Image (cartoon, rainbow, N blue to C red):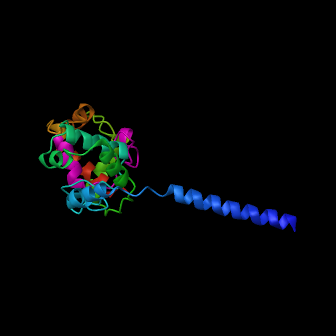
Amino acid sequence: MRRMFKLSLAVLLAGVSAAAMAQSAKPAPLPKHVQEIITGRCALCHGPEGESASAVYPRLAAQHPDYLQKQLKDFRDGRRKSDTMSDMAKDLQDDDIAALAAFFASKKAGARQPGDADLAAVGKFIFHRGNSYSGVAACASCHGPKGYGTEQLPRLAGQHPAYVETQLKEFNKRERTNDNAIMHSIASKLTELETRAVSVYIGGLQ
């Protein structure tokens, strides 16, 4: 009888512990004003879950929170130039930026359809092996073999090809005004075909 009681108590305590852990694992609810920022600003271009419908705007879902925070602060503080984003971020406090970054980082990235197979094959080569003839480093050497990036470097996997291509061209011309030191030296060595091909390959990564 005592053994059964101990067993039942252990099961009960285990259940309570599991429930407590599950409860603690749930993200804290967003402050109302941060929810309003998402619905009133972010969702207009990036979608309410960070899955932008237009290739003009980047996917935010599953992006690294530290990277998102850096970009938002760079927009706010003028280190990254964009009339639209600078205006959107100009009044954001650091706590707001941290909450926005955590929100979009927590969203699961949706599946993307692969693009042109022939272009993607060229892009795959550049992404994983670079181009030793022109001195282009492999994208995977920094962003990882699956394009998942790091806390400091962006997740590329599944990003809109047109957006990736635009950013590479802006790095090449130094029109992208932040994060330029390394990316300019890479983008400036890519041919137009390689730029397009690697963007298409990245867009099909899951």
Which of these two is toward me, 164 or 121? 164
Residue 188 is situated, as x and y percent measured from the top left of the image, at 19, 36
Residue 203 is situated, as x and y percent measured from the top left of the image, at 29, 55
Residue bounds of the magenta highlight: 141-170
Q: Is residue 187 above or below residue 1?
A: above
> Residue placed farthest to the left in the image?
83
Can you tell which quarter of the image residue 179 is in? top left
Could you tell me which residue is drawn at 59 percent across and 62 percent down?
19
> Residue placed farthest to the right in the image?
1
Which of these two is toward me, 139 or 1? 1
Q: Quadrant of the C terminus?
A: bottom left
> Residue placed farthest to the front in the image?
32
Q: Quadrant of the N terminus?
A: bottom right
Could you tell me which residue is drawn at 85 percent across and 64 percent down?
3
Left/right of residue 159 with respect to residue 193 in the rendered view: right
Whether residue 126 is visible, yes or no, is no
Residue 34 is situated, as x and y percent measured from the top left of the image, at 30, 54
